[in-house]
Amino acid sequence: MLNAILASALTPMEKQVSFEVCLGKANKNIAGDFYVSQRTIEAHRANAFQKLRVRNALELAQVLGLDPDHIDYERQTGPVWFCSSSIPSMSCCLDRCASSVGLT
């Protein structure tokens, strides 16, 4: 009950960012997905942590009632140029152009 009351204090954007944080996404990736600056995501994350009185993503998942064993974590395994969404970034387009011309 208390968790639901605390979670209701979050804005819609803070809820979305909190869920993405629980998935293990980096602030840079979340910013790319939502087309906002990394600093904006950092502010939403800090506000959510303060409102829910948590110190890390694991505590955040517990307060939001997410089961850490059933979350499909999307840890980045390599360099990320823009975002983690399915929309290709400029580097993807440049790679495709270079391969079609025969530069790679």
Image (cartoon, grey):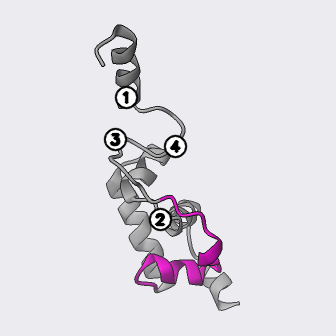
Callout 2–callout 3 Cβ contact below 8 Å: no
Residue holding disc 1? 90
Callout 3–callout 1 Cβ contact below 8 Å: yes
Q: 75 or 55: nearer the eye?
A: 75
Residue 81 in the image: state x and y as whole percent.
Answer: 34, 41
Q: Residue type at mark 2: give it.
A: Gly
Q: Earlier in the sequence, mark 3 or mark 1?
A: 3
- Looking at the image, which residue is at 43% across and 65% down? 44
Q: Residue type at mark 4: give it.
A: Ser
Where is 40 relative to 100, above or below? below
Does residue 70 appear to the left or right of 18 in the view shown? right
Inspect the magenta stretch and tell me whether residue 9 lies in it. Answer: no
Does residue 13 appear to the left or right of 3 in the view shown? left
| Identity of the residue furthest to the top in this view | 101
Where is 47 relative to 4, above or below? above
Q: Earlier in the sequence, mark 2 or mark 1?
A: 2
Q: Residue type at mark 3: give it.
A: Trp
**Residue segment shown in magenta:** 54-74
Residue holding disc 3? 81
**Considering the image in quadrants, where does the C terminus appear?**
top left
Label of residue 31 in the image: none
Label of residue 24 in the image: 2
Real-space Cα distance between discs 4 and 1?
A: 13 Å
Secondary structure of residue under mark 1: helix
- Looking at the image, which residue is at 65% across and 80% down? 65
Residue 15 in the image: state x and y as whole percent.
Answer: 57, 66
- Looking at the image, which residue is at 45% across and 53% down? 30
Residue holding disc 4? 85
